[in-house]
């Protein structure tokens, strides 16, 4: 049976396991430390149930870092994509283990996770620039910990998932303040300025299709039909450590067909001829059939390299700084302001639903509603 024992202002669940023959003393397992008696009573009931079902195991003294690094991550390696596993491993190594990794797993409290999240929001960046991680990044760490502790709870290593009681930061959908988008005139000016650079074709396609970085760089020629002016997104190129790896699209709705305008088709035809000339001149082959390749090697362009070149081009030619991903937002905003139906924009971007698109781009809608009100008035009264 499990009993409640108050100690040091907290409540512990104590399980008596008979007499230890080596010492002649009673064996006791101490579980966690709960803030209230009610929490401890619920835990005691769960432990008692596990005893009756034959699922009970004595708690060990493994630390959170040891559990994540030595037990949980190795088991997850075959179940996760390489990029997701790499992200989990880095989050444990860089953010979790140095701050709360020494805490024993069974003594971990929700407040420990709350403190971790608060610290990461203030000084979580490790690139030397200082500052905190974005709320979304911290919430991703919370999601990882929640999954890891859920597995520990399911297997009886701990008797509750403290991550369920923690308070991760709230992530709001990107709005006008978070998104930095260019106007149609600004985009046209930038594209004109970079037309003679080696990066014009991929950036032009990104701007005119709304494709994500990985979708753009993972695109293959066999998925492009220039005669019918369309392409198919069915994979993406992921940055995994120092490597680039082809993976499945981000979501099921990311698999989609995107129609192209005549100018974009012309840009791609010109690029294809230039790409073949570059490969022949360097004696290399495009083994992966990628639309955009490194001229010297014929390999796909690494996502991180593409982002770096984007930043350099924007710093030199851009009307104002925006992120590479904001080029996707620019595409969507221009379409919505041109009164393209939200459903069409949603399908073009590969969003889960038009409702999601409306939430993300709600800063564009007020102007559209004003135009709609004027149009209605003109139709009825003019």
Image (tube, rainbow, N blue to C red):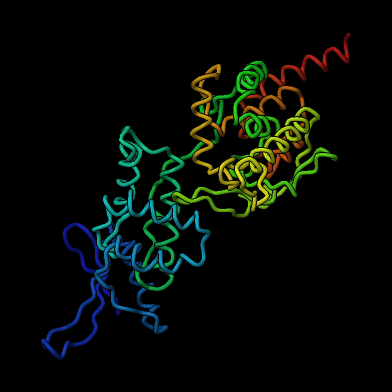
- Left or right of 326, for residue 48: left
Judged from this view, the residue extending furthest toward the top is 382
Image location of residue 292, percent across then percent down: 64, 41
* Residue nearest the observer in this picture, 277 or 272: 277
Image location of residue 167, percent across then percent down: 39, 47
* Residue nearest the observer in this picture, 236 or 166: 236
- Left or right of 320, for residue 144: left
Residue drawn at the location 33% of the way across and 33% of the way down: 131
Q: In which quarter of the image is the C terminus?
A: top right
Residue drawn at the location 63% of the way across and 40% of the way down: 281
- Left or right of 331, for residue 27: left
Residue drawn at the location 23% of the way across and 71% of the way down: 30
**Is 210 drawn above or below residue 57 in the view shown?**
above
* Residue nearest the observer in this picture, 57 or 47: 57
Numbered disc total: 0
**Is 199 drawn above or below residue 153 in the view shown?**
above
* Residue nearest the observer in this picture, 316 or 362: 316
Judged from this view, the residue extending furthest toward the left is 23
- Left or right of 175, for residue 11: left
Quarter of the view holding residue 16: bottom left
**Is 147 drawn above or below residue 183 in the view shown?**
below
Residue drawn at the location 29% of the way across and 59% of the way down: 108
């Amino acid at each position: 049976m499990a009993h409640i024992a108050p100690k040091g202002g907290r409540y512990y669940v104590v399980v008596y396991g008979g007499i230890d023959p080596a010492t002649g003393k009673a064996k006791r397992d101490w579980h966690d430390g709960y803030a209230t008696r009610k929490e401890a009573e619920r835990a005691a009931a769960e432990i008692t149930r596990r005893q009756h079902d034959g699922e009970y195991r004595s708690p060990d003294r493994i630390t959170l870092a040891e559990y994540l690094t030595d037990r949980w991550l190795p088991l997850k390696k075959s179940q996760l994509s390489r990029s997701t596993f790499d992200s989990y491993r880095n989050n444990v190594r860089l953010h979790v283990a140095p701050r709360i990794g020494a805490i024993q797993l069974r003594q971990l409290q929700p407040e420990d996770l709350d403190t971790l999240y608060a610290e990461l929001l203030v000084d979580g960046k490790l690139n030397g620039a200082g500052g905190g991680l974005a709320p979304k990044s911290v919430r991703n760490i919370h999601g990882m910990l929640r999954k890891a502790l859920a597995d520990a709870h399911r297997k009886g290593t701990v008797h509750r998932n403290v991550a369920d009681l923690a308070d991760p930061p709230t992530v709001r959908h990107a709005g006008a303040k978070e998104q930095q988008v260019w106007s149609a005139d600004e985009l046209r000016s930038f594209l004109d300025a970079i037309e003679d650079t080696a990066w014009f074709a991929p950036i032009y396609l990104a701007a005119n299709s709304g494709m994500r970085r990985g979708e753009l760089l993972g695109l293959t020629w066999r998925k492009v039909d220039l005669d019918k002016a369309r392409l198919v997104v069915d994979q993406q190129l992921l940055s995994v450590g120092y490597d680039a790896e082809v993976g499945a699209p981000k979501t099921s709705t990311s698999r989609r067909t995107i129609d192209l305008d005549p100018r974009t088709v012309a840009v791609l035809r010109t690029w294809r001829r230039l790409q073949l000339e570059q490969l022949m001149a360097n004696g290399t082959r495009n083994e992966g059939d990628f639309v955009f390749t490194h001229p010297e090697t014929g390999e796909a362009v690494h996502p991180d390299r593409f982002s770096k070149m984007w930043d350099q081009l924007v710093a030199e030619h851009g009307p104002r700084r925006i992120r590479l991903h904001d080029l996707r937002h620019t595409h969507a905003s221009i379409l919505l302001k041109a009164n393209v139906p939200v459903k069409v924009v949603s399908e073009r971007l590969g969003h889960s639903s038009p409702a999601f698109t409306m939430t993300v781009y709600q800063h564009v809608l007020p102007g559209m509603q004003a135009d709609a009100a004027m149009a209605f008035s003109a139709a009825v009264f003019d």
